[in-house]
Image: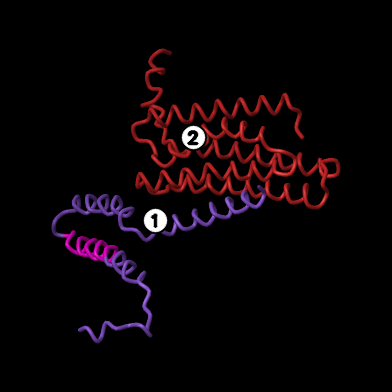
Amino acid sequence: MEIAIWTFIVFILVSLFKTLKYEKNKAIYNEEELIKRYFEIKKISPDCRVLEFKAWEISAKKILEQNEERKVGNIIKLKVFDNTKRLF
Amino acid sequence: MINLELAHFIAKFYLLAYFICFAVSFSNKYNNKSNLIIITYALVFSVLNQYIKSSLDFYTFYLGSAASCLNCIFLSLITHLSMKVKHSKTTIYIYIFYILIALSYMLIHRIRVVIFDSDEHILWLINTQSVFTLTLYFLSICVFIYGSNILWKSQFGRLSSLF
């Protein structure tokens, strides 16, 4: 009984840190901030807003790229059994 | 421990405060979603934990209450992920408060069961721990009220026309 409760407590603490890290990296959760920023920039007069729009675009692209990078990085590469070079 | 009548009074007061926080943030149009989620769990578990605690014995009482305190965090994490709601700053503060409460429970469990095996020698420690938890619960209520984004004019504006 006691050990079960201890494992439960440890499991919760680990899952908390995991989710907070997951939220920081995922693009879905940054969507709202990007949209807000977009409408802020739209209010600025058209002569001045070009540079800010470019910065916004770069930041949006960066978030999407980061998301894809992580997906690729999750694959485990085994050098000994790596036969991909022979196929291509 | 604290005098039981006083403790019951404080518990009733906190339960009422949780319920008011829930009602206000539920009725508010511009509420903080993640704050609403954790308020509902706090309200549900404040009642449910009493039933869990009554089934525990001497050796698992404080550890079980620590686990039931962290249960609230765990379920709110699941709902945050499933509903795709981002954690706001206020919820993270509440998580910190709840973890501190659970840590104090675990400390008491360790000292009471493993070192002393009785309540008599460490009554002062149990007293201070109960005061510590009650203050942290009070602070969490303050954070709930701050996080519910109450606009006093839109919520209670009609009252001012009466006077």
Q: Quadrant of residue B141?
A: top right
Q: Is residue A23 left or right of residue B18?
A: left
Residue at the image point whose x is 43% and y is 59% from the top: A21
Callout 2 and callout 1 share a chain? no
Q: Quadrant of residue B30?
A: top left
Chain B visual colour? red
Tell me: residue A68, above or below residue B124.
Answer: below
Residue type at mark 2: give it: Ile
Q: Are marks 2 and 1 in contact (CB under 8 Å)?
A: no
Rendering coords of residue A38 (x, y %): 22, 53
Q: Which is more toward the observer, A44 or B15?
A: B15
Chain holding disc 2: B
Chain holding disc 1: A
Q: Which is more toward the observer, B34 or A17?
A: A17
Residue at the image point whose x is 46% and y is 30% from the top: B22
Badge 1 crowding class, 10 Å Cα cut-off, few under 14, some 14 to 19, many 20 or more, is some
Q: Which chain is purple?
A: A
In the picture, the disc for residue B145 is: 2
Residue range (magenta): A48-64
Query: Callout 1: helix, strand or loop?
Result: helix
Q: Which is more toward the observer, B161 or B123?
A: B123
